[in-house]
Amino acid sequence: MTNNKIQMLKGLIGKCRGRPCTCPNVHLTLFFALIFFLFLGCNILAEDWEIYKSDHFSVYYEDNLSFAQRVGYKAEEYYKQLDRNVGFTRFGKFWTFDKRCKIYIYANKKNYLENNDIPSWSAGFANYNKREIKSYKESVNFLTSLLPHEMTHLILADYMGNNIPLWFNEGLAVNMELTSKSGYINAIKKELKKGEILSIYEVLDRTNYPEDEGKVLLFYSVSYSIVNFLRSKGQYRFTNLCRALRDGKSFEDALRSSYQFDFGNLARLDKKWQEHIRNLLTK
Ligand SMILES: [Zn+2]
């Protein structure tokens, strides 16, 4: 595996380490995580955080107001973008007043690592139950990649609760990143060039991430590509799909009610998506 790929995987795992999981071992992990967060909560209170507040975010920072303001500005921009693209946040007072999303920005990586139980390569993470994101000032790609990615997970969790298919959650989060998607597209191209047949069914029913690290990037790539393909058919259909999922419909029923003139069922979506990715090889 190339260094680039290893970095990409570490980034993915680092990003999504805080998401809910159905694995039985996780309950034990969650117990220790709870103890850890209670302990961490004491640390946070003990730390001398300054706060910058925007309409929907409270940015806690240690020493740099201008960076905190930049984080708040970008977060508001992504918030509006998610609203424009997906239509989640226009109902009610989403993330306002005491329901603001909290973003903690440590002054440097050392402080970030010392105060959080995370691997040394982590660039930041989200705690969905607490509606908060943590990172540090010099974190590479925090503003362009990690922040919009994690915000998407937080907003989806608030909007759709437990009705989010894993592939849809990750696929939309990757779509919202501003960084290049070439790594994901190349992963799909590579499989196709090997003669592998890719199908939407590879990700559709997954409730956890592939155990094989080599398959993790492909999982994200296929998920990103399917969501991107659905979004390419127009915002109106995509928003309806999200609402149908929020209301508890299965993905196939949600697809039927929102894309009936394009696909109508899973088999048809699979056929059209496979045609779409084969076209990537000609570009
Ligand atoms: Zn993620």
Image: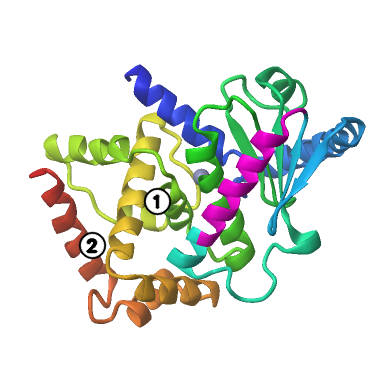
Q: Secondary structure at mark 2?
A: helix
Q: Is residue 194 above or below residue 52?
A: above
Q: Position of residue 195 (x, y in %)?
A: 12, 39
Q: Is residue 234 left or right of residue 41?
A: left
Residue 83 seen in the figure: yes
In the rendered image, the quadrant that contains the N terminus is top left
Q: Residue at x 37, y 52 (%)?
A: 203
Q: Are marks 1 and 2 in contact (CB under 8 Å)?
A: no
Q: Nearer the viewer, mark 1 or mark 2?
A: 1
Q: Position of residue 216 (x, y in %)?
A: 40, 37
> For this rendering, which residue is in front, 177 or 202?
177
The image quadrant that residue 158 belongs to is: bottom right
Q: Position of residue 269 (x, y in %)?
A: 24, 67
- Mark 2 is surrounded, within 10 Å at the Cα level, by few (under 14), some (14 to 19) or many (20 or more) other residues, namely some
- What residue is shown with label 2? 270
Q: Residue at x 32, y 56 (%)?
A: 228
* Amino acid under disc 2: Asp
In the rendered image, the quadrant that contains the C terminus is top left
> For this rendering, which residue is in front, 4 or 103?
103
Stretch in magenta: 63-80
> Quick check: is 136 in the magenta stretch?
no
Q: Secondary structure at mark 1?
A: helix
Q: Residue 175 has which mark?
A: 1
Q: CA distance from mark 1 to mark 2?
A: 19 Å
Residue with the most extreme front position: 66
Residue 18 seen in the figure: no
